[in-house]
Image (cartoon, helix red, strand yellow):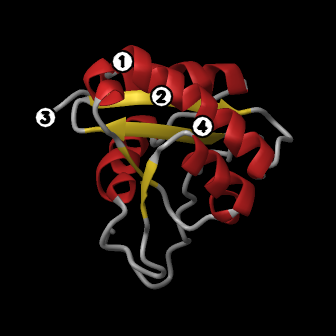
Amino acid sequence: MQWKATSSLRLKKARMSLSKFKGMLIVFFDIQGIVMAEMVPNGQTVNYQYYIEVLTKLREGVRRKRPELWRNMWILHQDNAPAQNALSVKQFLANKNITVFEHPPYSPDLAPCDFYLFPKIKSVLKGTHFVAIEHMKAKTAENLSSLTRT
């Protein structure tokens, strides 16, 4: 804000143009850091078939990165997205003995990604104009790899 006379012209503000693309990121993390992150390909709808593919990769990621959890028990906490509540996804999780911590509907209390992960990613990417989606993916991956237990 600034002081000006009522008769003076309005100042023009420079604005950054919006990016011409969007990216969707699926991230699984625990207290020790990121277990798996995957950028959804352009044009891909996150439906139950795609989500089962992601969960298959997640199982492998847990086996590799958190072997102590693989031998014992790990609990998956996911929100109430339609793809995650599909019957075939629930059957897949039951067949693989993956315990799911149900997310209460309309509850922001149990959304750790909204309070921990996304604000950290957004603070680093804020104000950056990407000319190609590959640059955005690389910067996001770099940012995710730097997040560790705090």
Q: Nearer the viewer, mark 3 or mark 1?
A: 1
Label 2 with label 4: CB-CB less than 8 Å: no
* Kind of element beneath mark 3: loop
Label 1 with label 2: CB-CB less than 8 Å: yes
Residue assigned mark 3: 150
Q: Which mark is residue 65?
A: 1
Label 3 with label 2: CB-CB less than 8 Å: no
The amino acid pointed to by label 4 is Leu
Q: Earlier in the sequence, mark 1 or mark 4?
A: 4
Q: Position of residue 143 (x, y in %)?
A: 40, 26
Residue assigned mark 4: 55
Q: Which mark is residue 11?
A: none
Does residue 146 appear anywhere in the picture?
yes
Residue assigned mark 2: 36
Q: Position of residue 130 (x, y in %)?
A: 63, 29
Q: CA distance from mark 1 to mark 2?
A: 9 Å
Looking at the rendered image, the quarter that the C terminus falls into is: top left
Label 3 with label 1: CB-CB less than 8 Å: no
Q: CA distance from mark 3 to mark 1?
A: 18 Å
Looking at the rendered image, the quarter that the N terminus falls into is: bottom left
* Kind of element beneath mark 2: strand
Q: CA distance from mark 3 to mark 2?
A: 18 Å
Q: Earlier in the sequence, mark 3 or mark 4?
A: 4
